[in-house]
Amino acid sequence: MTRRFLFLPGSTRPDGNTELLARRAAEQLPADVEQHWIDLARHPLPDFEDLRHDSDHTRPTEGNARLLLDATLAATDIVIASPLYWYTLSTPVKRYLDHWSGWLRTPGLDFKATLAGRTLWGVTALAHEEREVADPLIGALHNSAAYMGMRFGGVLLGNGSKPGDVLRDTEALARAKTFFARQAPYARFPYERAGAAATR
């Protein structure tokens, strides 16, 4: 299958540091790899309503929900580009992932089976020098990939607060050059990894 990268910037600030870093990484992809960019803040989804015990979900037929669902199903690689907001994912990104819950229960989509084996990546910029403060964001993406049976390519971290700051983070820019180059492993929940280690 031809690789198709779906980039999902989720900042509430246009051309923010996270998107700048994601674009630097995307520049390194081979020319034959398709790229599709959808800004989640400029293509907002409605608040997710949990109807799993009340009614059947229907496939969205119009608007941003249809655009994002179709793009998600078509992608081999999904790149969540979320700045670190209060130590986790931004609101537009969280809302998008919440809609996965509905798409999982939509008859005829086979959403989970379709995404299984595909790859989830993350990119984030944070103001802290201490990278461990991004662990909740990384954990949310890693565990989402594990639940879906996806591969997880990790999160490309950069430092920046004011617009353009990340372009001065030479270490992050160096990591961006090879970030998408490796084969990502399948994601596993922490308890699965711990169980596997205990049986060795």
Image: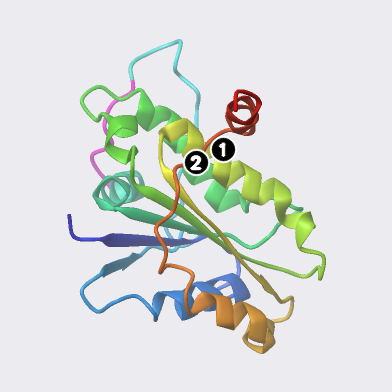
Residue 187 at what x, y percent from top left? 49, 41
- Whether the residues at callouts 2 and 1 have beta carbons within 8 Å, the answer is yes
Task: Name the mark on residue 126.
Answer: none
Q: Position of residue 37 (x, y in %)?
A: 36, 66
Q: Between residues 37 and 147, which one lies in front from this camera angle?
A: 147
Is 114 in the magenta? no
Note whether residue 184 is visible: yes
Q: CA distance from mark 2 to mark 1?
A: 7 Å
Q: Is residue 151 above or below residue 31?
A: above
Mark 2, other Cα within 10 Å: few <14 / some 14–19 / many ≥20:
many
Residue 187, labelled with which disc? 2
Secondary structure of the residue carrying numbered label 2: loop
Q: Which residues are magenta?
A: 57-62
Q: Is residue 103 above or below residue 168?
A: above
Q: Which mark is residue 143?
A: 1
**Which residue is rendered at x = 45% and y = 48% of the image?**
185
The N terminus sits in image quarter: bottom left
Instruction: Choose between 110 and 183: the one closer to the eye.
Output: 183
Q: Position of residue 98 (x, y in %)?
A: 51, 36
